[in-house]
Image: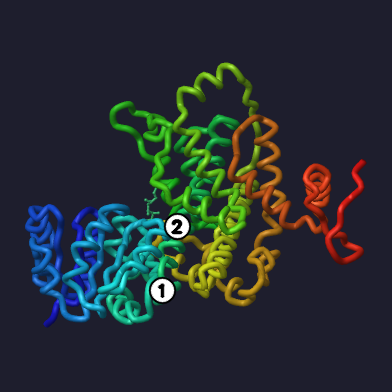
């Protein structure tokens, strides 16, 4: 039997994906920059190692693979990927495919795709962390149809399944897979931030302890907020620190890290003329979290946070509305990118492959998928059935945002989502005044509603 796929990179994610492949009966070869990682990995693989060929030398690794070859790179994104492609390039044939399964900037993926002359290059988004990689991730595949033909039989068996449907798709050409993964992460940032905002309202505005908040989230994870992130939140809020005896979250420094995917979503959204304001608020909140000493000083200089009283059902609905709005922003960015880069993204299919395996998997995605399927050409806010889904939860979002704002409790992502919604549904907006200002100071001209052509005002 032939070796069907090579996995290069035996870090946490690479090892997990390699074991997943072997587990599904797929014969693989593995290699790693530090060759001394290979033997311990084979040992860890136990009986699965009978399906795994370890190759310390890159030439041997490539030679072990059946043609046309498939190589999956599970290495840090950026320069290491370019180095690796340069090393692989002379060893490959035009029918071979190299997959970058890291979190790459899709612009780099497009560049690498254009530069790959001796092989097909595929950018693939993989979500679900180590657990997902080992037992079923959600995978967003870019690149050519030729590569997809090679990859489909390998990826479908290892993907997460939602009611039997594998959570993997060829979403579009060149950088589409990495772009879709980037937006997935942008939504992930916004969802995490909104959850944290509700946590903050309960902790600082209502004096709740972590386990009590955890119990509420546990409750919500069985309802309309059912999702991996709400479940995870409930779980972490219940953990006690063995050193201090306090809830572990209470001893964790309030500074969040970020590796760039959230920021890329916002940057690309702006380039595409879109407003991903809830995602931007989440990226901005992580940035603010780093300024710990400045915040401590400002807390003394500008004191005063009031108490609030919001009932759990209102908070639940507000979080639901915020979550819907963050997803809509993400899908609108995808729609704009699809037009710009000619990807023909199937938004409904993307929602479907996010229903299991990935970090943002939720019952909401299962509700959104059929709406996106039914009226794909409309703005997502106007999709058939969206009003029924979203409108009933909006008053709760208003109440929570209004109450939190009045008390001085920060809810940047929830309020950005609400402002985006109110702007999007304002039939007669205020850009007429912007146009008048532009014409008054810069003679930029404006259109009139009652006659065609470009006009100027006599502004005096
Ligand atoms: C996933 C996650 C995963 C990871 C990112 C986010 O889909 O499995 O999105 O890719 O959590 O690294 O990273 P940061 O929060 O560190 O930016």
Image position, residue 290 (x, y; %): 44, 32
From the image, tell me which residue sits under label 2: 182
Which of discs 2 and 1 lies nearer the camera? The answer is 2
Of all residues shown, which one is farthest toward the front? 443
Marks 2 and 1: CB-CB under 8 Å?
no
- Asked whether mark 1 lies closer than 8 Å to ligand 1, one says no
Residue occupying image coordinates x 27% and y 58%: 82
From the image, tell me which residue sits under label 1: 169
- Residue 36 is at least partly visible in this image: yes
How far is disc 2 from disc 1 in space, using C-alphas?
Answer: 15 Å
- Residue 13 is at least partly visible in this image: no
Q: Quadrant of residue 337?
A: bottom right
Of all residues shown, which one is farthest toward the top? 301
Look at the picture and state if 133 lies above or below 214: below
Q: Secondary structure at mark 1?
A: strand
Image position, residue 1 (x, y; %): 11, 82
Q: How many marks?
A: 2
Q: Nearer the viewer, residue 370 or 205?
A: 370
Q: Earlier in the sequence, mark 2 or mark 1?
A: 1
Q: Secondary structure at mark 2?
A: helix
Residue occupying image coordinates x 34% and y 28%: 245
Q: Nearer the viewer, residue 92 or 146?
A: 92
Image position, residue 243 (x, y; %): 29, 28
User: Which quadrant is home to the C terminus?
Assistant: top right
Image position, residue 372 (x, y; %): 59, 71
């Amino acid at each position: 039997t032939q070796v069907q796929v090579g996995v290069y990179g035996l870090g946490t994610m690479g090892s997990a994906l390699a074991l997943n492949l072997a587990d599904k009966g797929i014969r693989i070869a593995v290699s790693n920059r530090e060759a001394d990682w290979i033997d311990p990995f084979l040992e860890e693989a136990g009986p699965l190692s009978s399906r795994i060929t370890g190759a310390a030398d890159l030439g041997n690794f490539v030679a072990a693979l059946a043609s046309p070859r498939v190589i999956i790179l599970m290495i840090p994104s950026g320069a290491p990927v370019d180095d690796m492609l340069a090393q692989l390039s002379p060893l490959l044939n035009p029918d071979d495919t190299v997959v970058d399964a890291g979190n790459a900037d899709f612009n780099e993926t497009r560049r690498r795709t254009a530069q790959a002359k001796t092989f097909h290059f595929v950018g693939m988004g993989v979500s679900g962390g180590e657990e997902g990689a080992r037992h079923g991730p959600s995978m967003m595949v870019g690149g050519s149809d030729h590569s997809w033909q090679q990859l489909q039989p390998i990826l479908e068996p290892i993907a997460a399944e939602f009611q039997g449907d594998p959570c993997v798709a060829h979403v579009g050409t060149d950088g589409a897979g990495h772009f879709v993964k980037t937006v997935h992460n942008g939504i992930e940032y916004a969802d995490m931030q909104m959850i944290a905002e509700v946590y903050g309202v309960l902790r600082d505005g209502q004096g709740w302890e972590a386990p009590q908040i955890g119990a509420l989230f546990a409750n919500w994870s069985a309802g309309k907020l059912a999702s991996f992130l709400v479940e995870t939140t409930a779980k972490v809020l219940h953990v006690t620190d063995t050193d201090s005896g306090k809830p572990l979250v209470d001893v964790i420094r309030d500074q969040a890290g970020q590796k760039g995917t959230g920021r890329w979503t916002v940057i690309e959204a702006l380039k595409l003329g879109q407003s991903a304001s809830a995602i931007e608020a989440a990226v901005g909140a992580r940035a603010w979290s780093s300024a710990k000493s400045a915040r401590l000083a400002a807390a003394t200089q500008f004191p005063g946070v009031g108490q609030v009283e919001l009932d759990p059902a209102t908070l639940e609905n507000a979080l639901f509305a915020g979550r819907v709005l963050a997803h809509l922003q993400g899908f609108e960015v995808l729609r704009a990118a699809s037009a710009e880069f000619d990807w023909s993204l199937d938004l409904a299919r993307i929602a479907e492959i996010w229903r299991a395996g990935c970090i943002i998997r939720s019952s909401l995605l299962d509700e959104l998928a059929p709406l996106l399927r039914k009226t794909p050409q409309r703005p997502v806010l106007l999709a058939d059935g969206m009003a029924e889904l979203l409108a009933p939860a909006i008053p709760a979002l208003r109440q929570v945002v209004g109450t939190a704002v009045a008390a001085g409790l920060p809810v940047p992502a929830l309020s950005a989502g609400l402002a985006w919604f109110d702007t999007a549904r304002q039939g007669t907006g205020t850009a007429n005044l912007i146009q008048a200002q532009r014409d008054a100071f810069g003679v930029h001209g404006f259109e009139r509603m009652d006659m065609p052509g470009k006009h100027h005002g006599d502004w005096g």
